[in-house]
Image (spheres, rainbow, N blue to C red):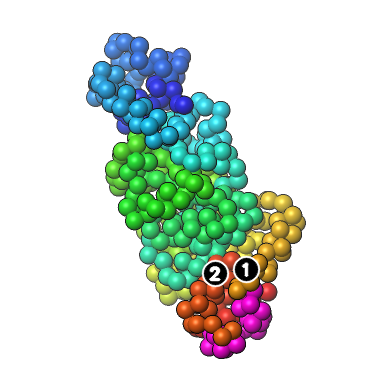
C-alpha cells in the first residue's frame, strides 16, 4: 500500500514537479501530515493556493474516504518509493507519484509493449491491431493500451485471446471510460491489470489523456502505432516514447487514407516501419531464435474446425465462395473461422474475398 502522504499529495493535484520539491524538503512522504505552514512557505515553488490545498485536505475527510474506497474495491496503490513500482516508469521525466492498480499487478514489471491508434479504425486497422496484439501476447509480451475505442480496444481483445494486457486509464478506476468498455475492463482485471494515476472517481477530463499517454509509453519497451491521423493522440504517445528513449514503430497504410498520414509521418521521422512481427522483436533485441521456434509451433491451428478451413486455403489462395462450397459450412460460420484465422496471423486477405495462407 502506498504511503498515505503520497496519496494525499496526489489528491491535491499539485504539479508533479512541485511534489518532488516537497519530497526534497521532507524526509518521509508521511511527514506531510506534520509539516507546519511556515515550513511549507519555505518551498519556493509552492504558491499560497498550493499550500491551502495541502492544509485543507489534511483537515478534511477526503483522504479517509479515498483510503476506504481503495480497501473496499481491492485496489492496490503503489507510490514512487515502493520497490514494486514499475522500474521503467521511474526513468521518465515526470513519473506518477502514485499508481492505482487492479488485477495482476506483477505484470507491470514484465516485458511490456504498447499498441495505440485511432478511435475510428478501418477493417485493416482492426485486424492488424488484434493480429499483432495476439501474436506478441502469445510470445509472452504484455500488451499495453489506453482502453479507448478503436485500436486500443482491439489491441486489448487480441492480447486477451493469447495472454495478458494492461489498460492505462485517463480516469479513475471507479469511473471507467468509455462506458461501453466497462465489460472489457472487467475482463482485463481477470487476465491483466487496470492502471491509473488519478483518484478513484476522477472523471475523464480532456487534460488527463496526455498524462495517461506518458504512462502507456513509459512502462513499455516500445510503442506500435496502427492507423492515426495527423493530429491523433496516438502521435502524442509516440513522441513521448521517443523522448523517453523507447522504440517507436508504425504500421504503413494506404497513401490516400487520412488514417495513414500520422503513421507515415512517424516513419519519416524515424519510426521503424513494421510489416512483419520480426521487425518488432529484432528491434527490441529479444531472443529472436527462441521466439521464432515458439512462433513456428503456432503456424497450424489447433481447433478442428479452424484446421479444416485452413487445409482448404492454399498459399496461392482461394475465394470465399470456393471455401464455403468445399467445407459445406454456412457463410456465417466460414466468415467467423476466417476472421479467427486472420487474427491469429495464419491467413491473409490478398484481395476482396480471396484468402491465402501466410507463408
Of labels 2 and 1, earlier in sequence is 1
Residue 288 magenta-highlighted: no
Camera-side residue of 208 and 291: 291
User: In the picture shown, does residue 177 fall above or below 297?
Assistant: above
Instruction: Say which residue label 2 marks.
Output: 340
Q: Residue at x 32, y 15 (%)?
A: 40
Q: Secondary structure at mark 1?
A: loop
Q: Quadrant of the C terminus?
A: bottom right
- Is any atom of residue 148 visible in this view? yes
> Mark 2 near mark 1, Cβ–Cβ under 8 Å?
yes
Q: Main secondary structure of the magenta part?
A: helix
Residue topped by disc 1: 303
Q: Residues within 10 Å of mark 2 (few under 14, many from 20)?
A: some
Give the image quarter of residue 16: top left
Which-is-in-front pick, marks 2 and 1?
1
Instruction: Let me know if residue 317 is in the magenta part.
Output: yes
Q: Residue at x 32, y 23 (%)?
A: 64
| Whether residue 214 is visible | no
Quote the CA–CA distance across marks 2 and 1.
Answer: 11 Å
The residue stretch that appears in magenta: 307-326
Q: Nearer the viewer, residue 343 or 83?
A: 343
Which residue sits at x=48%, y=58%?
A: 157
Left or right: 89, with 317 as reference point: left
Residue 25, image x and y in percent? 42, 16
Amino acid at each position: 500500500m502506498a504511503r498515505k502522504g503520497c496519496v494525499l499529495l496526489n489528491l491535491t493535484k499539485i504539479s508533479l514537479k512541485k511534489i518532488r520539491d516537497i519530497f526534497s524538503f521532507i524526509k518521509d512522504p508521511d511527514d506531510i501530515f506534520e509539516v507546519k505552514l511556515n515550513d511549507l512557505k519555505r518551498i519556493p515553488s509552492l504558491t499560497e493556493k498550493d499550500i491551502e490545498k495541502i492544509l485543507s485536505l489534511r483537515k478534511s475527510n477526503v483522504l479517509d474516504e479515498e483510503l476506504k474506497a481503495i480497501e473496499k474495491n481491492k485496489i492496490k496503490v503503489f507510490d514512487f518509493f515502493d520497490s514494486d513500482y514499475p522500474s521503467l516508469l521511474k526513468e521518465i521525466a515526470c513519473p506518477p507519484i502514485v499508481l492505482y492498480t487492479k488485477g495482476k499487478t506483477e505484470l507491470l514489471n514484465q516485458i511490456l509493449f504498447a499498441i495505440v491508434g485511432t478511435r475510428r479504425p478501418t477493417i485493416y486497422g482492426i485486424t492488424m491491431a488484434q493480429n499483432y496484439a495476439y501474436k506478441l501476447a502469445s510470445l509472452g509480451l504484455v500488451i499495453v493500451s489506453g482502453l479507448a475505442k478503436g485500436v486500443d480496444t482491439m489491441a486489448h481483445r487480441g492480447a486477451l485471446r493469447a495472454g495478458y494486457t494492461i489498460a492505462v486509464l485517463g480516469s479513475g478506476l471507479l469511473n471507467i471510460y468509455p462506458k461501453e468498455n466497462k465489460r472489457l475492463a472487467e475482463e482485463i482485471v481477470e487476465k491483466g491489470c487496470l492502471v491509473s494515476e488519478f483518484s478513484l472517481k476522477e472523471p475523464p477530463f480532456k487534460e488527463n489523456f496526455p498524462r495517461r499517454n506518458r504512462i502507456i509509453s513509459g512502462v513499455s519497451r516500445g510503442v506500435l502505432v496502427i492507423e492515426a491521423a495527423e493530429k491523433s493522440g496516438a502521435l502524442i504517445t509516440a513522441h513521448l516514447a521517443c523522448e523517453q528513449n523507447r522504440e517507436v514503430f508504425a504500421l504503413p497504410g494506404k497513401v490516400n487514407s487520412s488514417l495513414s498520414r500520422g503513421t507515415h509521418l512517424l516513419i519519416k521521422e524515424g519510426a521503424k516501419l513494421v510489416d512483419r512481427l520480426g521487425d518488432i522483436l529484432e528491434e527490441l533485441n529479444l531472443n529472436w531464435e527462441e521466439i521464432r521456434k515458439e512462433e513456428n509451433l503456432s503456424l497450424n491451428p489447433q481447433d478442428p474446425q479452424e484446421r479444416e478451413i485452413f487445409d482448404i486455403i492454399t498459399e496461392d489462395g482461394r475465394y470465399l465462395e470456393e471455401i464455403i462450397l468445399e467445407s459445406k459450412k454456412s457463410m456465417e460460420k466460414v466468415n467467423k473461422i476466417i476472421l479467427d484465422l486472420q487474427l491469429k496471423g495464419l491467413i491473409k486477405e490478398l484481395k476482396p474475398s480471396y484468402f491465402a495462407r501466410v507463408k
